[in-house]
Image (spheres, rainbow, N blue to C red):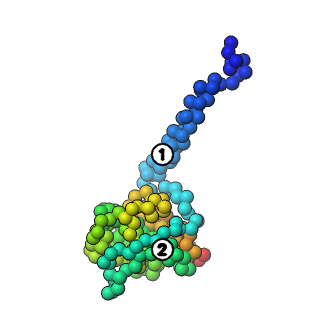
């Protein structure tokens, strides 16, 4: 009879196998959670560790050649999100079909609420972002360029488009994954802006 059987302990190789499988078990648990959120029809249920936390520090250059009312539309920094009023941050790209679908909602949001909306143009070769806004209209007070994808990574973006409501102190109050529909505008985005205004 072996020492392992006498002591009732599992053999050492079994323990090692169990530890080796632990990362896979964690991965599959997280994958199942994401799959559930996607299959539920509401990708906005995907988790975000940033809710309630300060927006990531960044400095994004302006979208070259983008003008509004004769003036250049600026880029922005994280400090611009701490102005005492809520800001909506929207990641978009000209190659993104859902971005085209949601764009009228962004124009409606600005006209209806007066909230400051800033855009982050994600991995969009020039002149893609500028042509996109020239064709569909510009709801943004500022547009930063994320050529490398670094800003999207720091914001935990899964894909285009994604939208965040940031409170006046620069904390992320809400995240919406996927295109904003008229229903989502009413049910999630506008209420989140109103709640952020009360803080």
Secondary structure found at label 2: strand
Residue 55 placement, left or right of 162: right
Instruction: Name the residue: 70% across, 22% down.
Output: 8
From what the image shows, is residue 13 above or below residue 186?
above
Of residue 50 and residue 180, the one placed in the foreground of this image is 50
Q: Which residue is mark 1?
A: 31
Q: Which residue is mark 2?
A: 77
Instruction: Name the residue: 31% across, 70% down.
Output: 129
Residue 159 location in percent, x, y?
A: 40, 58
Residue 25 placement, left or right of 121: right
Q: Quadrant of residue 198?
A: bottom right
Instruction: Name the residue: 63% across, 23% down.
Output: 11
| Nearest to N terminus: mark 2 or mark 1 | 1
Quadrant assignment for the N terminus: top right
Front: mark 2 or 1: 2
From what the image shows, is residue 195 above or below residue 37?
below
Visible residue check, residue 6: yes
Visible residue check, residue 137: no
Residue 103 location in percent, x, y?
A: 35, 70
Instruction: Name the residue: 54% across, 62% down.
Output: 50
Residue 150 location in percent, x, y?
A: 44, 61
Q: Quadrant of residue 125?
A: bottom left
Secondary structure found at label 1: helix
């Amino acid at each position: 009879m072996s020492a392992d059987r006498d002591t009732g302990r599992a053999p050492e190789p079994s323990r090692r196998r169990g530890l080796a499988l632990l990362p896979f078990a964690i991965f599959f648990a997280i994958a199942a959670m994401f799959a559930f959120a996607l299959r539920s029809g509401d990708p906005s249920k995907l988790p975000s560790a940033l809710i309630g936390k300060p927006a990531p520090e960044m400095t994004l250059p302006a979208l070259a050649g983008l003008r509004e009312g004769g003036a250049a539309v600026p880029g922005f920094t994280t400090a611009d999100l701490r102005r005492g009023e809520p800001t909506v941050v929207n990641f978009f790209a000209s190659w993104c079909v859902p971005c085209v679908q949601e764009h009228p909602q962004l124009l409606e949001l600005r006209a209806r609420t007066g909230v400051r909306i800033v855009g982050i143009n994600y991995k969009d070769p020039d002149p893609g972002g500028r042509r996109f806004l020239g064709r569909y209209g510009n709801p943004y007070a500022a547009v930063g360029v994320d050529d490398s994808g670094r800003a999207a990574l720091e914001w935990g973006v899964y894909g285009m488009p994604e939208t965040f409501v940031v409170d006046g102190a620069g904390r992320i109050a809400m995240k919406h994954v996927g295109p904003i529909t008229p229903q989502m505008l009413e049910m999630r985005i506008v209420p989140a802006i109103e709640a952020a205004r009360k803080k």
